[in-house]
Amino acid sequence: MGSVQEGMRGTMTQAKQVPTLTDPTGRSHDLSGEMTIVGRAVECDVVITSKRVSREHACIRRQGWRVFVEDLGSTNGTFLNDGRILEAMQLRDGDVIKIGDVLFTFHDPDVTYQDTVLPQLEVDVAAGVVRMDRQDVALAPKEFDLLAYLHERKGEVCTKDDIGTAVWPEYADGAVYDYQIENLVRRLRAKLEPDPNAPQLLITVRGRGYKLLDFG
């Protein structure tokens, strides 16, 4: 197993409690800055001396009270609770992050004061992988096509005409009915939304179409 040490830019323990990463030796690494880089290079904030770790492997980023982990294009990937992360993921108290062969536990001292955590959606179109709140979601082909189209345009309003053309390309004349799109949206919400009757991710923009919200 690789050994872990504070990097050259590591910070001293703060009087005010801040989120931390605890390594297998029990040592805590403060996440007091806006960004903490973890990797093999001595310039990193947290250095892991292991060949399975890339020079700049992953980063922990703070955004207000929210904390995210993101892989930096490492060779062996970054894992959150045994699942390889595909994009930046919000951390929760007690989460386990695997970098190379080292396991870190994330601790958040303010966990009892935080607001409700927003739903977390991961989509890897090339791999055909969808995860909701870190759990794999099985989608039918048309459901996946719709999600992939909306995900590529996160935050943008997509009209029913555009969705029909993208999801049903086999209909050369564009004869896709509104009820087909509405039913497909309904089925997708049932698999992604905590409460499909009060959607938080896939929003209807009245008179215009649909929009997949971007919580990043």
Image (cartoon, rainbow, N blue to C red):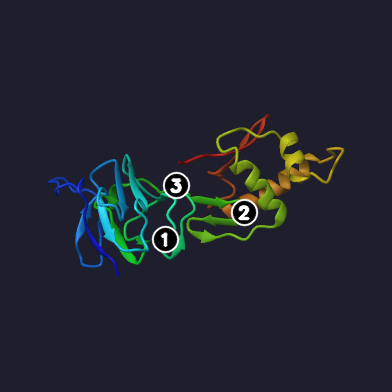
Rendered residue at 72%/48% (across/down): 183
- Amino acid identity at mark 3: Leu
Disc 2 to disc 3, C-alpha distance: 17 Å
- Amino acid identity at mark 1: Phe
Residue 2 position, x and y percent, is 28, 66
Q: Main secondary structure of the magenta part?
A: strand
Q: Which residue is mark 3?
A: 118
Crowd tier of the residue under label 3, counting other residues whose Cα lies within 10 Å: few below 14, some 14–19, many 20 or above = few
Residues marked 2 and 1 touching at CB (< 8 Å): no
Compared with 155, 136 (above or below) is below
Residue 128 position, x and y percent, is 62, 56
Judged by depth in the image, the label closer to the viewer, 1 or 3, is 1
Task: In the displayed orientation, state which residue is furthest to the top.
Answer: 207
Residue 102 position, x and y percent, is 32, 65
Please say whether residue 180 is visible from this viewpoint.
yes
Magenta part of the protein: which range?
76-80
